[in-house]
C-alpha cells in the first residue's frame, strides 16, 4: 500500500564528485539512484537496504534503490535523494511565476516493488 | 599552440619533470578557493594541495575527453562547420534561447550576452534554477551584505538556513565562516556561535552549536516568526509550534542571541529557493536581516553553487540591467522570471532553438522541459559528455575553465578572482567557440565590424 512522504532532493559529496568524474559512470549513477529512508520508516514498512521502491509524484514516477539514512539525519515521513536526473523527473514544469520548479519538499507516494533477495 | 595553452599560468615553479602551479583557483563551487597548489606531470594534474573532496575530484578528473571537439548530429565535424551550423540555428530561430554559463568565465559570458542581443533572443543562466528566487527578492527587499573577508574577521554569529555546506561547499567552514581566526575573533571557532536551520539533520548540523529542525515547507513561517519576535510582538506558542514544528521558546532564544551578537551572518541555500514559497522565502530572510540592523550588524549571503554562477549574475546584469531571464525580442532587454526563464520557455513549448553552455538541462529539468528541448535544434558546449550534449544538433567539447583556460570568475560574495590554468587542451575554450559563433551570427544578419 503506497504511503505519502515528503521528498527532499539535495547535494551530496558523492554526487558532486561524480559530476567531475562523469555523469555516465557508476559513482554518479549509484548516488542519484539511491533513496535515503529514515530507519524508523524502514522498520515500520518492512523495507531493508537494497530494496527497490517506486516513487510517484503529481508529475512523474521513478524507481530507486533504498539505503538507510545515517543516524538521525532524516525524520520519519521524509525521504532524501541526491539531486539529479532521477529526482528531476518528479518535478513539474510549472514554476509558479518564479522560473524555479518546486524541486524540494515534493509530495511522493512510496511503494515497495521488489523485496531484497534473502 | 592554442590560445588556452598560451594562457597557462606565468612562471610556474618546476621540480624536475613536475610543474607546480601555486595558488590556482578551484572553480567547482562558489567558494572559488584560490589557494590550491597543483602538481602537474605530463599535462595531467596529479595533486591538488588544500583542495576539498569536491575540488580534488574537479582537478584530478580533468583528463581530455576522448571525443571530437565538434559533433554535428552526433557525427564528428570540423570546428568551422560547427560554428557555421550553430550560427544558422540561432539566427533562423524565432524564439532562440541561450542558457547556462555558470561554469564559464566572465569573458565568455559576455560574448554569450552579445549573441543573445544580436539574435533578439532570450538569455538565462542556471541562476534561475538556483538562487533566481533570491535574485527576485534582492530587487524587492534589497541586500544587506558583506564580503567573506568580513565574515572571517567579524562574524561572531554564523547562521546557515536551508544550506548544507559540509557537502556542497566543504571548505566554507574552515576557510571563511567558522574556523578562521579573524581580526576581531582571535580565538576563531571559540569566538563564534553557529546556528543551523534545516529540515534534515545534515552533516553540517554536526558543526552547529544550535540546530533548529524546522518542519518541511515551513521556512516562510519560521522566518516571519523571527521577524515578529525581532519587533517584540507576542506570538501564540501553540500556533508557532504547529506552523513551524519548533517551540516558540527556541525561536525566542535564537532571537535573543541574534540581537546580542556583534556581527551576524545568515548564509542561505536552496532549501529556501527550491521549496514552496521560493522568492517569498528569500524575501522573508532578507527582510529579517534588514530588521536585525536596528539592533546590531547583520548581513545575508546566498551560498552559491557553481564556480562562476555569481559571475553570470554580474555579467548579465551589467550587460542588460537584469541578472537572468532576459528577453531581447523587442530589441531591448526585458526581465520576467516565470516567462523568460528557461524552465518556462522550454516547458511551455515556446523556444524553437537554443544554445546551452556548461549546463545539463536534459538531466536537471522537468520532463516537459526536457521533451521540448529534445524536439528543437540546439547547440551544446560542455567539457564532458552529458545527456544534453548527446541530444544536441551541434555539440562542442570545450576546454575546462580554470584548468585549461584563464579568465575571471566571481566568488559567491561578488569578489572577482583570476584563474591560473595549469594544463593544455586540444579543445577550444568557451570563449573561442562563442566568439566564432558571434562572428558568424553578425555576418548572417548583416552586421559589419
Image: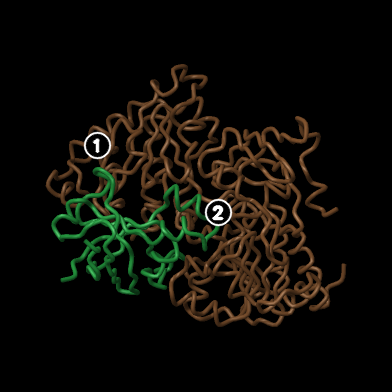
Chain colours: A green, B brown
Q: Which residue is mark 1?
A: B232
Tell how many labels: 2
The circle drawn on residue B61 is none
Closer to the camera in the image, B271 or B362 = B362
Distance of mark 1 from mark 2, alpha carbons? 52 Å
- Which x, y percent locates residue B426? 77, 57
At x 64%, y 70%, the residue is: B355
Q: Quadrant of residue A22?
A: bottom right
> Which residue in the structure is indicated by mark 2?
A21
For the residues carrying marks 1 and 2, which lies nearer the camera in this image?
2
Residue B73 x/y as whole percent: 66, 79
Which image quarter: residue A64? bottom left
> Could you tell me which chain the residue with mark 2 belongs to?
A
In-front residue for pair B448/B66? B66
Vertical comparison of B22 with B407: above or below: above
Secondary structure, mark 1, is loop
Relative placement, left or right, of B224 versus B437 is left
Amino acid at each position: 500500500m503506497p504511503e505519502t512522504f515528503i521528498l527532499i532532493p539535495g547535494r551530496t559529496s558523492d554526487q558532486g564528485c561524480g559530476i567531475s568524474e562523469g555523469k555516465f559512470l557508476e559513482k554518479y549513477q549509484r548516488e542519484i539512484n539511491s533513496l535515503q529512508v529514515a530507519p524508523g520508516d524502514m522498520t515500520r514498512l518492512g523495507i531493508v537496504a537494497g530494496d527497490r521502491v517506486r516513487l510517484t509524484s503529481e508529475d512523474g514516477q521513478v524507481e530507486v534503490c533504498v539505503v538507510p539514512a545515517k543516524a538521525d539525519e532524516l525524520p520519519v515521513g521524509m525521504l532524501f535523494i541526491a539531486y539529479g536526473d532521477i529526482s528531476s523527473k518528479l518535478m513539474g514544469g510549472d514554476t509558479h511565476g518564479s522560473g524555479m520548479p518546486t524541486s524540494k519538499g515534493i509530495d511522493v507516494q512510496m511503494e515497495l516493488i521488489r523485496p531484497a533477495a534473502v | 599552440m592554442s590560445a588556452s595553452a598560451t594562457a597557462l599560468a606565468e612562471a610556474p615553479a618546476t621540480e624536475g619533470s613536475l610543474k607546480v602551479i601555486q595558488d590556482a583557483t578551484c572553480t567547482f563551487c562558489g567558494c572559488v578557493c584560490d589557494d590550491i597548489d597543483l602538481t602537474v606531470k605530463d599535462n595531467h594534474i596529479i595533486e591538488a594541495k588544500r583542495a576539498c573532496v569536491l575540488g580534488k575530484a574537479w582537478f584530478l578528473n580533468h583528463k581530455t575527453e576522448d571525443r571530437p571537439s565538434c559533433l554535428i548530429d552526433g557525427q564528428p565535424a570540423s570546428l568551422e562547420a560547427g560554428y557555421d551550423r550553430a550560427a544558422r540555428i540561432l539566427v533562423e530561430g524565432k524564439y532562440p534561447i541561450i542558457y547556462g554559463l555558470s561554469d564559464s568565465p566572465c569573458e565568455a559570458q559576455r560574448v554569450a550576452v552579445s549573441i543573445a542581443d544580436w539574435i533578439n533572443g532570450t538569455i538565462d543562466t542556471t541562476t534561475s534554477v538556483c538562487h533566481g528566487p533570491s535574485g527576485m527578492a534582492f530587487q524587492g527587499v534589497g541586500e544587506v551584505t558583506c564580503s567573506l573577508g568580513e565574515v572571517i574577521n567579524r562574524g561572531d554569529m554564523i547562521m546557515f538556513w536551508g544550506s548544507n555546506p559540509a557537502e556542497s561547499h566543504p571548505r566554507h567552514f574552515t576557510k571563511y565562516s567558522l574556523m578562521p581566526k579573524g581580526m576581531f575573533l582571535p580565538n576563531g571557532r571559540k569566538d563564534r556561535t553557529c546556528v543551523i536551520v534545516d529540515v534534515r539533520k545534515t552533516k553540517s548540523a554536526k558543526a552547529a552549536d544550535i540546530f533548529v529542525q524546522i518542519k518541511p515547507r515551513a521556512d516562510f513561517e519560521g522566518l516571519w516568526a523571527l521577524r515578529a519576535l525581532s519587533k517584540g510582538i507576542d506570538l501564540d506558542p501553540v500556533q508557532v509550534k504547529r506552523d513551524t514544528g519548533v517551540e516558540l521558546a527556541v525561536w525566542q532564544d535564537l532571537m535573543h542571541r541574534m540581537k546580542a551578537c556583534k556581527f551576524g551572518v545568515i548564509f542561505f541555500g536552496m532549501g529556501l529557493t527550491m521549496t514552496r514559497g521560493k522568492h517569498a522565502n528569500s524575501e522573508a530572510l532578507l527582510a529579517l536581516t534588514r530588521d536585525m540592523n536596528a539592533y546590531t550588524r547583520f548581513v545575508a549571503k546566498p551560498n552559491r553553487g557553481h564556480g562562476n554562477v555569481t559571475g553570470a549574475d554580474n555579467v548579465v546584469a551589467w550587460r542588460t540591467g537584469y541578472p537572468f531571464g532576459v528577453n531581447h525580442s523587442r530589441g531591448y532587454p526585458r526581465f520576467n522570471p516565470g516567462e523568460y526563464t528557461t524552465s518556462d520557455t522550454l516547458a511551455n513549448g515556446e523556444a524553437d532553438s537554443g544554445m546551452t553552455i556548461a549546463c545539463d538541462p536534459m538531466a536537471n529539468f522537468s520532463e516537459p522541459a526536457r521533451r521540448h528541448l529534445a524536439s528543437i535544434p540546439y547547440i551544446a558546449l560542455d567539457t564532458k559528455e552529458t545527456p544534453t550534449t548527446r541530444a544536441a544538433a551541434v555539440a562542442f567539447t570545450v576546454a575546462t575553465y580554470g584548468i585549461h583556460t584563464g579568465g575571471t570568475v566571481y566568488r559567491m560574495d561578488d569578489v572577482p578572482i583570476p584563474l591560473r590554468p595549469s594544463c593544455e587542451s586540444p579543445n577550444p575554450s568557451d570563449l573561442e567557440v562563442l566568439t566564432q559563433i558571434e562572428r558568424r551570427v553578425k555576418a548572417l544578419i548583416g552586421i559589419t565590424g
